[in-house]
Amino acid sequence: MKALMIQGCGSNVGKSMLVAGLCRAARRRGLSVAPFKPQNMSNNAAVTADGGEIGRAQALQALACGLEPVVDMNPVLLKPESEAGAQVIVQGHRTGTLRARDYAQRKPSLLAAVLDSFGRLRAAHDLVIVEGAGSPAEVNLRAGDIANMGFARAADVPVVLAGDIDRGGVIAQIIGTQAVIDPEDAAMVSGFLINKFRGDPRLFDDGYRLIEARTGWRGFGVLPWFAQAHLLPAEDAQDLASGPVTEGVVIACLMLSRIANFDDLD
């Protein structure tokens, strides 16, 4: 297998951290591994050696792989500028600002650039671990999709679906995702995993078996809550509230509605 894709049942379920962890695990096993995210939406950007921009999460994942970040790791980056518009960065370079409706029309044309970048990474490494965006259950966005199942099917990459048990409702997250997505998309899913579990995972044995029985998907395990996650660079402003509390000198950062690169203050 040359590639694996982690998709989530929703935003902030831990996809970025899962990919970073899997990248480091693969590297420790002697594999040449690289991260990839077809489309990212984040105002936290990292600059590559050649001056391009990619999402901060892909730069962290590159570090886990022992690699320098390159633009191919995140060929499409959206940087929100308003409630309805975002800068569109393609293979590291700004191509303009588009409203959401206009981007939806342009999105299918970006698949070629996405597959081009993915092809270079796959040719250069033993393994590419791909991160999805949001959730494939957002079926209203499926037409022209390049971030989740649209990419998985175009590149023929198997998918593992991650659910967030910390928020509750993880059984419905996973079974519900299978219920609403297209059967051909569901066929791309090799299995599921449960993320952010606190306590004794054996307490979830019955729920785990229920998901396997109802979906027919293989369970790949239950992953514990990672308390040190806040020490790593954050990708989303939602993560600010969970940062560490310290005594002594306090450095404050204004949490504006479209705050960008706030992790530079770390």
Image (cartoon, rainbow, N blue to C red):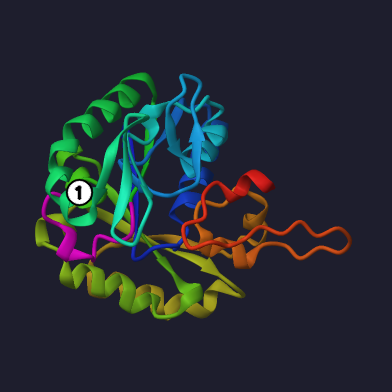
Direction from residue 169 to residue 49 in the image, left or right: right
Asked whether residue 119 is in view, the answer is yes
Q: Which quadrant does the N terminus fall into?
A: top left
Quadrant in the picture for residue 252: bottom right
Residue shown at 33% from the left, 62% from the top: 83
Position in image of residue 231 (x %, y %):
68, 52
Look at the picture and state if 34 lies above or below 43. Answer: above
Name the residue type under label 1.
Tyr
Q: Secondary structure at mark 1?
A: helix
Chief secondary structure of the magenta portion: loop
Position in image of residue 116 (x %, y %):
23, 26
Categorize mark 1 by other alpha carbons within 10 Å: few (<14), some (14-19), many (20+): some
Foreground: 92 or 255?
255
Position in image of residue 17 (x %, y %):
51, 51
Residue shown at 45% from the left, 30% from the top: 33
Residue 142 lies in the magenta stretch: yes
Foreground: 115 or 101?
101
Q: Which residues make up the magenta segment? A: 133-144
Asked whether residue 26 is in view, the answer is no
Position in image of residue 104 (x %, y %):
16, 51
Residue with the mark numbered 1:
103
Direction from residue 211 to residue 216 in the image, left or right: left
Residue shown at 23% from the left, 66% from the top: 137
